[in-house]
Image (tube, helix red, strand yellow):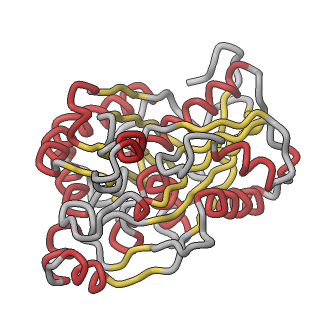
Amino acid sequence: MTGATGRGSAIMAVGAYRPPTVGSDEAARKSGVDRDWIVSRTGVETRCEAGPLESVVVMATTAAMTALRGANMRASAMDAVVVATSTNPQPCPAVAPQVAAKLGLTVAAFDVNIACAGFCYALQVARSLIASGDCGNVLVIGADRMLDIVDPADRATGPVFADGAGAVVLTAVTGATGVGPVVWGSAGARAAALEVRPTQFEAAANPGLPAPTLRMDGLAITRWACATVPKVVREVLSVTGLEWNDVAALVTHQANWRLIKKLAAILEVPEKVVVADDVRMTGNTSSASVPLALHRIIADGQAHSGQWAVLVGFGAGLAYAGQAVRIP
């Protein structure tokens, strides 16, 4: 459970930035359905919608500052900034260097773009940087403005996706680690089940094409998730040496509440284990959904410092990643 240098890592604090919430009534109007239709199929009762001034960089920076305050650490103590996002409005520059600059940093900073699994991927990258001895403290951020790439009239995506950012401060520790080994992989042959199309370059070259928007085969994603995610969670428990009796919370990607409940049922998660349901209040924020869901269960007192939580992200790619972490 530690890297080659024997250095483990632990989450010191979780930060969050949630834009204002709006009810599902508005999403229902835009997609031509009623509110009950949305809630019964997705569980989304409200969701966060960013305004014009709440860019991915702004949201990511604010979440990072919240995490730093929670850890009682200065930004200057950070050795790297890793941002998981799939909604950078520009191919370059990356979001992370801009976040670092706003924090007064000139450290290594880079983005990870693996959509809904992005935060868990970024967390493992940060864990590896610490295990290698290259870094002592890393800011790990998940931030997305999903409503920038969603067609509000599309019933498959319009009612569920949302905007937000979550962050953690990861630091080197001696002795028992607070972040277990990762279980990750991908099924790229199925990538077309969740993609943005046309590409921005195709749209620019062909003015008659619609704007690039997120398209999802919900049934295909559900079938893949139900076949894949339970195996990932079981392997996370196995490689970390945990059983359900050792776990306080299951924090999956907040795809939709109906799917999360189905995954929990397949896994036969005990009643004592909190199943994160942030999607009901925040919506599906892609890369931000896992840290935001973790933040909510901590803020609500549903899980406590020192307890284990199992994280698992899954989605576009199709990619997945999971690890167990000790709650700060």
* Front residue (pair 267, 90): 90
**In the figure, is residue 238 to the left or right of 51?**
left
Near-viewer residue (65 or 156): 156
Q: Is residue 159 left or right of residue 305?
A: left
- Quadrant assignment for the N terminus: top right
Residue 96 in percent (x, y) is at 67, 44
Relative placement, left or right, of 103 versus 230 is right
Q: Residue at x 76, y 33 (%)?
A: 108
Q: Is residue 312 visible?
A: no
- Give the image quarter of residue 171: top right
Nearest the viewer among 214 and 200 is: 200
From this view, report whether residue 219 is shown above or below residue 229.
below
Q: Can residue 219 be seen at all in this image of the molecule?
A: yes
Callout count: 0
The part of the image, by quadrant, that contains residue 66 is bottom right
Q: Where residue 87 sits: x, y (%)?
A: 48, 51
314 shown above or below 279: above
- Answer with the quarter of the image where residue 183 lies: top left
Query: What residue lies at 29% left-to-right and 64% top-to-bottom?
Result: 151
Q: Residue 200's x, y, as percent?
A: 41, 45
- Give the residue displayed 28% in from the left and 51% down from the top: 209
Asked if residue 226 lies left or right of residue 311, the reply is left
Residue depicted at x 21% and y 65%: 154
Q: Position of residue 35 (x, y in %)?
A: 20, 83
